[in-house]
Amino acid sequence: MKALALFLLFFVSVSMASAQPVVVIVRHGEKATNGGTDPDLSSAGRARADALARILKDSGITVIFTTEFKRTQETAAPTATSAHVTPTVVAAKDTTGLVAKLHRLNGNALVVAHGDTIPNIIKALGINSPINIPDEDYSELLVVALGDKPELFRLHYPL
């Protein structure tokens, strides 16, 4: 976990020096088995959200985007608290609106989305590498350096 945090810190520092915003995109943490179509996070999901906050604590996150679902908001909450940022809620299916906001960034952003929407977000940001997130995978940490030629760094963060 320390190696991942160091890599991410280095990457964000280089990005900040070149003035290109970085977007960190993650899937929400593990969800509880009860709660219908809008469940809370499970204890593992809460632990993952806390791990994400520790990883991103020095990353210069100035904007956080979540969807209208509790699991994305709960995943972002620890990072929002440590970064002193109020998350912006965007509709889960509004990739176009989200990407327009990301292209207007003046700083680094965290996007907490869903396994079925992240591939579209990545593609809309100009990354041609296909992304497939299996239903049981909550460890994806996708870092996109915006700019004339966006770059993707695909990492995993374990609990």
Image (tube, helix red, strand yellow):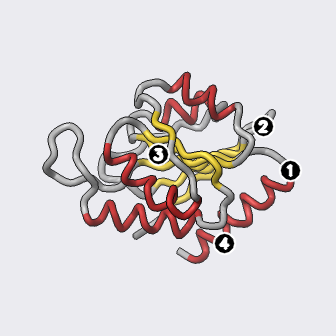
- Disc 3 marks which residue? 112
Q: Amino acid at mark 1?
A: Ser
Quadrant location of the C terminus? Answer: bottom left
Q: Amino acid at mark 4?
A: Leu
Real-space Cα distance between discs 2 and 3?
Answer: 21 Å
The local secondary structure at tag 3 comes to: strand
Above or below: residue 133 compared with residue 15: above
Real-space Cα distance between discs 2 and 1?
Answer: 10 Å
Percent x, y of residue 120 = 50, 30
Badge nearest the viewer, 3 or 4: 3
Where residue 123 sits, quadrant-wise, is top right
Tag of residue 6: 4
Percent x, y of residue 143 = 62, 50
Q: In terms of sequence position, does the residue under pointer 3 or pointer 4 come before the other? A: 4
Q: In terms of sequence position, does the residue under pointer 1 or pointer 3 come before the other? A: 1
Q: Nearer the viewer, residue 20 or 152?
A: 20
- Do tag 2 and tag 1 residues touch (Cβ < 8 Å)? yes
- Badge 4 crowding class, 10 Å Cα cut-off, few under 14, some 14 to 19, many 20 or more, is few
- Disc 2 marks which residue? 147
Q: Nearer the viewer, residue 34 or 158?
A: 34
Percent x, y of residue 77 = 43, 56
Look at 59% across and 37% down and name the residue there: 129
Q: In terms of sequence position, does the residue under pointer 4 or pointer 1 come before the other? A: 4
